[in-house]
Image: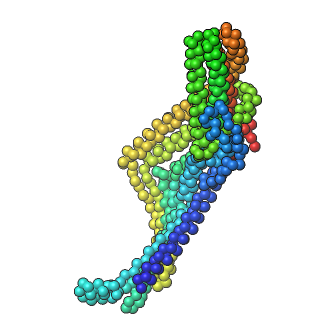
Amino acid sequence: MLETAIRKPLILLGITSVMLGCSASSYKRSADEESYGAITDKTELVPGMTTEVVVDEVRELNLNDFAVNNESFDFLDNEADSEIGASILGLNNVLDIAFQQSKDYQTQKELLYLEALALTFDRYRYTPIFSATGSSDYQWDRRDPFVQDMQILTGMQNVDIDESTFSNTSLGTQYILKSGGAIALNLTNNFTRFLTGDINEFGTSALVGSFTQPLLRGFGTDIETEALMQAERDLLYRLRDFTRFRKSFAVRVASDYYSILLNRETARNNFAGLNATNLSLEREQAFQVEGLTTLLEVGRLEQSALQADLRWTSSITRYKRSLDNFKILIGLTAEDNIILDDNEMDLISETGMDSPDISLEQSTEMAIQTRLDLYSSLDRVQDSARRIEVAANALNPTVDFSLVASVPDANNGNIGELDFENALYTAGLDFDLPVDTEFERNNYRRALIDYESSSRNYLLALDGVKLEVLDTWRRMNEARKSYDISVTSVEINERRVEEAQLRAELGLGDIQDTVDSQNDLTAARTELVSSIVEHNIAKLEFWRDVGLLYVDDSGQWEEGIDEPN
């Protein structure tokens, strides 16, 4: 008996768990349908927004699908072997990986989804909301075997027995009107059954319907639906922020990609500079043995070689550190072995140093017209203006009109039958005079200040957009000029190095000239590559800040005046 008594609850618990599991899965699907639907509805309002926002999507990444590096690079010193067997990733490959695997990108998708999920609840409040409750009780006295056993143990005298069941059910629905009113309907049933003596039953039912409508405080669609309106606009703002993030993220990935290539090229240049210095040192040491130069001059060149060696080692460290950090940025693990494609540096070099064919004045005007974050700042001014109206309405007295209809039980023995002929109708007004308005007063004053603050924030954002465009414009010009100077500087220092080497071989050279010319050539070559990278990055940021950089779901971008199809 005991085993059976235990088994049954366990079986019921198991069945209940299975039902809850199925129910939880259906709830998730329902939430996804409504949330993704809300995102899709507003996507067309945001230029450049994507519909591919799936928060739970996990895609397998196999780096073995990419080409593998089998070359050992001497300029990487003891890090050379670490890149053998590494997967070679081009910029397009990296962008696609980042938009699928990046944790930062996944977080932004989740924030967008949660904003849409919050909106679904605000929309749900203005649909008919149903409720169903019930309860059941069983009552008994001493004739129950358990009670009799307890009486034997306690020595209690026998008393009369009564056994009965009592159940209650309630079905209802409520519909909140956008005018501020509400309609409610509730049906209750009470049922009692006596199980001993003359078995009999007793039941009552009631149907109550009500309608309420504020006449002053809380009246009007603008007042009642303010929370819904703000939730709709908050989703729009989040969509704009997400679109802006996609652009900024693509630019950040590309900028870091080129910066890593620059660090790699810097290590290569420093290695070449070190080798050239060591050759000069070997020559001068040979001259010193023959007595053609002094130990002091050789020492100066030795010191230069040590400094060149240190610069080379430091540049390798910077390169590998930036590559490791980049793996985390795009969603790879620290153990993944990758290198970036050197050909990408050739591609941006071939594009030249041309800047966008648009004036600074046109760029600024275009940014004001297209920047989504600027639109959000302006819309928030409108939000604060609406909140002033809502706060002012809350200062009014409460005057609510109500209408209630109650339909009693028919009392004819038929459970659940109602007597509509004897229904009771009640109409009335509820008043609440604004005697204590300290909280509402403060909210109203706060709303006024918030409006002024949001207006200033918009003007500040407007100036910020202008300055961002101006800054990237200046950086493009600076990089272009730096490139022109570096080209000339490389040519000059190549001639200086060549002349210094010839003079040194003839025994006529000056060690300081040799050191300076070689260091200047290495720096000029690095600066030349740096100016190409900086110009390319500044150009990408310029299109982003102007609002004319369009990014697809794989992170590939298009730039220019016309939005891509």
**Is there any visible trace of residue 67 in the rendered image?**
yes
Q: Nearer the viewer, residue 292 or 254?
A: 292
Q: Nearer the viewer, residue 257 or 226?
A: 257
- Residue at 48% over, 53% down: 215
Q: Is residue 530 above or below residue 391?
A: above
Q: Nearer the viewer, residue 438 or 139?
A: 139
Farthest front residue? 290
- Residue at 67% over, 43% down: 85
**Is there any visible trace of residue 482 in the rendered image?**
no
Farthest top residue? 508
| Apparent side of residue 415 relative to residue 511 in the rendered image (left or right) | left
* Occupied quadrant, residue 252: top right
- Residue at 61% over, 14% down: 289
Residue 564 coordinates in the image, percent (x, y)? 74, 41
Farthest bottom residue? 198
| Apparent side of residue 59 relative to residue 164 in the rendered image (left or right) | right
Residue 277 coordinates in the image, percent (x, y)? 64, 20
The C terminus appears in which quarter of the rendering? top right
Q: Is residue 32 above or below residue 365?
A: below
